[in-house]
Image (cartoon, rainbow, N blue to C red):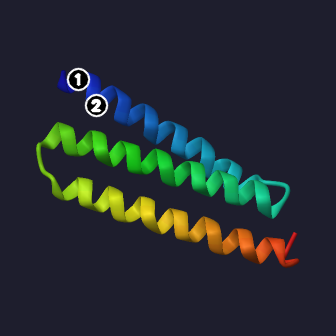
């Protein structure tokens, strides 16, 4: 069971790395924001899997806080871009 969790955590980390590449290369600010949000979700999922692997609940708290901050970040940047921010 723990081997499966490690495999999924590594897979989530690899997908987050791909999202971070899109974050750097994105042609528009909206593409960069979507990539940052996807990377945030994948990293939070990897932290949840790590919490299951290690048996410690503190990582779940960190994942929840990271997800909440990611939502707030997405809303703030979305409003900035909607009002004519950097393109």
- Indicate left or right for 63 with 60 as reference: right
Residue 47 in the image, given as x and y percentages of width and height: 32, 48
Q: Give residue 3's mark.
A: 1
- Indicate left or right for 79 with 53 as reference: right
Residue 1 in the image, given as x and y percentages of width and height: 18, 21
**42 versus 1 height, above or below:** below
Q: Which residue is drawn at 36% across and 43% down?
A: 46
Q: Which residue is drawn at 29% across and 61% down?
A: 62
Q: In the rendered image, which quarter is residue 52 located in?
A: top left
Q: In the rendered image, which quarter is residue 5 located in?
A: top left
**3 versus 34 height, above or below:** above
Residue 58 in the image, given as x and y percentages of width and height: 18, 58
Which residue is denoted by mark 2 in the rendering? 6
- Indicate left or right for 35 with 5 as reference: right
State the count of labels: 2
Q: Which residue is drawn at 25% across and 60% down?
A: 61
The reply to whether discs 1 and 2 touch (Cβ–Cβ < 8 Å) is: yes
- Indicate left or right for 24 with 18 as reference: right
């Amino acid at each position: 069971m723990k081997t499966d969790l490690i495999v999924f955590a590594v897979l989530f980390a690899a997908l987050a790395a791909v999202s971070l590449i899109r974050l750097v290369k994105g042609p528009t600010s909206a593409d960069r924001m979507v990539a940052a949000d996807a990377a945030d979700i994948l990293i939070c999922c990897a932290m949840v899997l790590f919490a299951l692997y290690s048996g410690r609940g503190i990582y779940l708290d960190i994942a929840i806080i990271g997800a909440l901050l990611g939502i707030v970040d997405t809303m703030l940047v979305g409003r900035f871009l909607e009002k004519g921010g950097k393109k």
